[in-house]
Structures are given as structure tokens and as C-alpha cells.
Image (tube, grey):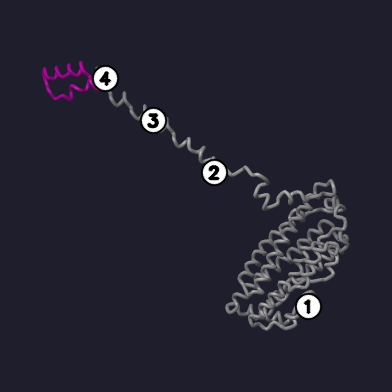
Amino acid sequence: MSTFSEFPETSGAPGSGGRADAAAAETAPVTETAPVTETAPVTETAPVTETAPVTETAPAADAAADAPNLDFAGTTPYEDYVQADVLTHLQHLRSDDPGEMVFLVTTQVMELWFTVIVHEWETASRALREDRTQVAVDALKRSVRELEALNHSWRPLAQLTPGQFNAYRGALGEGSGFQSAMYRRMEFLLGEKSASMLVPHRGAPRVHAELEKALHEPSLYDEVLAFLARRGLPVPAAALGRDHALRYEPSPEVEAVWASLYAAPAEHEELVRLGEALSDVAELVWRWRNDHLVATRRAMGAKTGTGGSAGVAWLEKRAQKNVFPELWTARSHV
């Protein structure tokens, strides 16, 4: 056979022995008829891992174990806590213009942020009364992030044209932002006190009582000055004993106190940290007022405000005022 033609040459035996070997090789080519390795490829005929993929049947049980609970007797725990159904059904539109929904929801979101920020500043005020500086600073820092979120709330309204605003402005009637009771509490905590701002709320006894209480309580800045005095700093008696129901007016002596702290930050690290947290708050309040001014100017120009105010002119006056004034002027003396 041609496939074995090389075997006689490798036998090494001449003569008849070689012929006998050749004949034997031709009559019994064992290796050709029984190629064991070719006929019994065990690994090919019994792929156990393919016929019994156990790991593929388990995920069903895992999925059932990971599934959330969907069966509740009443409302969901989420609803019970968040009251989302209440929040999402507070939009009672007064016009057919689609832009009114955005205006109303944005304003409602702002009110919620006012509520959170008032909570933080009241927490900071209470902590300062108890001489817990870090608790106060932590609350102020949280309020900084919340003020940033509040200021971003202007984005949906920031580019209103007069035509877009006029489409639903009539639905506001005499409603105006300065009538917001929660925003007024924010202003009172900043030291911007005014008894006349209680007048619009005489028809709402609970709201009026809350505002009257806030009017006569020390502002956040009053608590800061009292705290500095307890630390031995020369805060003037006039600033400590002032009528809390009146707007805070800047004091050269208070300015000197802040200047002395900022002039030696290594010695007054904790108090400078407090001052910087207050400065962050003041800056964002200033930005809020300016964002309000710009949005109003774009939407209605110099028209009279819906609440009867001078509109842009009134907002411009507000935007020029600094919160915690001595924290800004003191920097010129360091």
C-alpha cells in the first residue's frame, strides 16, 4: 500500500527477512484499521457541561428573592412619608396657557426651599445660643448647598419674554413674591426686619403669629454677635441690646471685631470658619436677589409689579444691600 511504502527502508534487514517483514506489514496494517484516537474522541461525545447547565436554572429563584414588595394594604410607605399625591395636586391653574404650569410649579419649589433654609438657619441660631460652633457651621454649610439649588430654580423662568409672561400674568392677580410668608421669615433671620411686612398676613392668623414671633426674636446675625461677645470679643453693647424687631444697621465696632479675627486667622480659626460660612450664605442671598431682578427685567421690563410695587426699581434697591454687612467691609481693613 502506498501509505506504508517507507516502512521497508526502515526495517534494516536485507534479503528474505526484509520481504517477510514487508509482507507482514502489507497483510496486517493494524495502525490503519484501528486509529483509536480518531474513533473514540471522548471529550466530543460527552460534553457534560452542555447537557446540564445547572447555573442557568438558579436566576429565577434569585430574581424572586430580589424583587421589591409590591403589595400594600393602603397607600405605599413612600406616599405616606413624602405625600407626593398632595404635592402633585396643588397646581390649580387659572389660565389655558401651558407656560403657567412651569411658573406655578417653579414658585412652589422655591417655597419648599425657603422652608428648608429657614430650618437650617434656625438650627444654626439655636446651636450658637448653646455655643456649639461646629453644629452651627454645619447647618450653614448645608444651607449654602440649598441656596445654590434655590438659585438654580430661576432657570426655567430666567428667559421669559414679555409676551410669554403676559399670556398668564393676569392669572396672578395681585399676587407677588414679597407676600411669601416663608421668604419673609428668611429675611427676618438675615436681620432684614420690618413690622409692615406682617400686614399682608393679617387674614391668616397662624401665619401672622409665626411672623410676629420671628420679628421679635434675635436674627441669625444677632445670635452670631452674642456668641462672639461670649468669646470675649469687644462687640458693642448697642449691637447686643438692640431692638430685635428693627432692621439691623451696620456698626463700625462690629466691623473692627471681624477685621481683628481675619487679621489673625491662625489664632481664630474656628471663628473665621464661622465668618466664611456666613459670607457664603450672604453671597448666595445677594445672587438670589440679582437673579430675581434679571428675570423680572427680562419678563416685564420696568412695569409696575403685580403686587403694586415699583417692580424692577424695588428689586434693584433690594439687590444693592449686603447681608451681614460688616463681614464684607471688614476685609478692606485686613
Q: In this view, does 216 lie above or below 67?
A: below
- Magenta segment, which residues? 5-31
Q: Earlier in the sequence, mark 1 or mark 4?
A: 4
Q: What residue type is labelled 2?
A: Asp
Picture quadrant of residue 199: bottom right
Picture quadrant of residue 200: bottom right
Q: Nearer the viewer, mark 4 or mark 3?
A: 3
Give the image location of residue 170, x and y in percent. 87, 53
Q: Residue under label 4, please give it.
A: 33
Give the image location of residue 309, x and y in percent. 87, 64
Give whichever of 275, 3 is nearer the camera.
275
Q: In this view, does 205 lie above or below 327?
A: above
Q: Which amino acid does label 4 sit on?
A: Thr
Q: Which of marks 2 and 1 is nearer the N terminus?
A: 2
Q: Label the magenta part by its dominant secondary structure.
A: helix
Give whichever of 148, 299 is nearer the camera.
148
Find the distance from the CA under tag 4 to the CA under tag 3: 27 Å
Find the distance from the CA under tag 2 to the CA under tag 4: 59 Å
Relative horizontal placement of residue 116, taking residue 67 as reference (left or right): right
Q: Nearer the viewer, mark 2 or mark 4?
A: 2
Q: Residue under label 3, please give it.
A: 47
Q: Which amino acid does label 3 sit on?
A: Pro
Circles 1, 4 touching at the beta carbon (< 8 Å): no
